[in-house]
Amino acid sequence: MNAKCITVRYEAGEYYLKNGVKGGTTYGCYYKNGKYHKNRGFGWESVYAPSRLILVVEIEGKRTEIWIDRFFKERVGRLTNNRICKIVGAMPNFVKVKNMGNYYLVQDSSLEAWLMSAEI
């Protein structure tokens, strides 16, 4: 199924420390509200959210968002400002998507062609 590309949006990640976390309430690392929380001990907790590269597409008259950051992070590494500009500038008009029930995925063949046109 083909989808028309509308725009690409970048959301920066964040990291901060949080104090006043009660000990023993959560063990290890957990995911809540789009952020990872890791207990550091002595009432401190690390909170971080990964950066996101989001493709907005139109499928059958409806707009939807697809996360594409994982593909580019695995292929080229960290999403620097220069790399983001090249990816956004090389956005294709149409991509092939796969319906996964509740969400859509961009097929790897479309993302590979996008990466080659971005010349990163």
Image: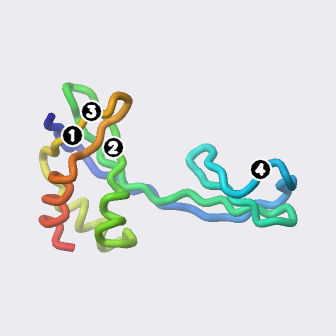
Quadrant in the picture for residue 111: bottom left
**Label 3 vs label 4: CA separation?**
35 Å
- Comparing 11 with 21, the one in front is 21
> Which SS class for mark 1?
strand
Q: Earlier in the sequence, mark 2 or mark 1?
A: 2
Q: Residue furthest front?
A: 27
Residue at the image point whose x is 42% and y is 55% from the top: 52
From the viewer's perspective, is residue 63 above or below residue 94? above
Q: Amino acid at mark 2?
A: Ile
- Amino acid under label 1? Val
Q: Classify 10 Å Cα crowding around label 1: few (below 14), some (14-19), many (20 and above).
A: many
Q: Crowding at label 2, few (<14), some or many (≥20) Cα neighbours within 10 Å?
A: some
Q: CA distance from mark 1 to mark 4?
A: 38 Å
Residue count near mark 3 (Cα–Cα under 10 Å), binned few <14, some 14–19, many ≥20: few
Residue 2: x %, y % from top left: 14, 37
Tags 1 and 3 touching, CB below 8 Å = yes
Residue named by callout 4: 26
Other residues around mark 4 within 10 Å, as few (<14) / some (14–19) / many (≥20): few
- Residue at screen point 67% across, 56% down: 29
Where is 106 relative to 39, above or below?
A: above
Would you name the residue on which mark 1 appears? 97
- The residue under label 2 is 66
What secondary structure is marked by label 3?
A: strand
Considering the numbered disc 4 on the image, is that residue within a helix, a strand or a loop? loop
State which quarter of the image contains the C terminus. Answer: bottom left
**4 sits to left or right of 62:** left
Q: Amino acid at mark 4?
A: Thr
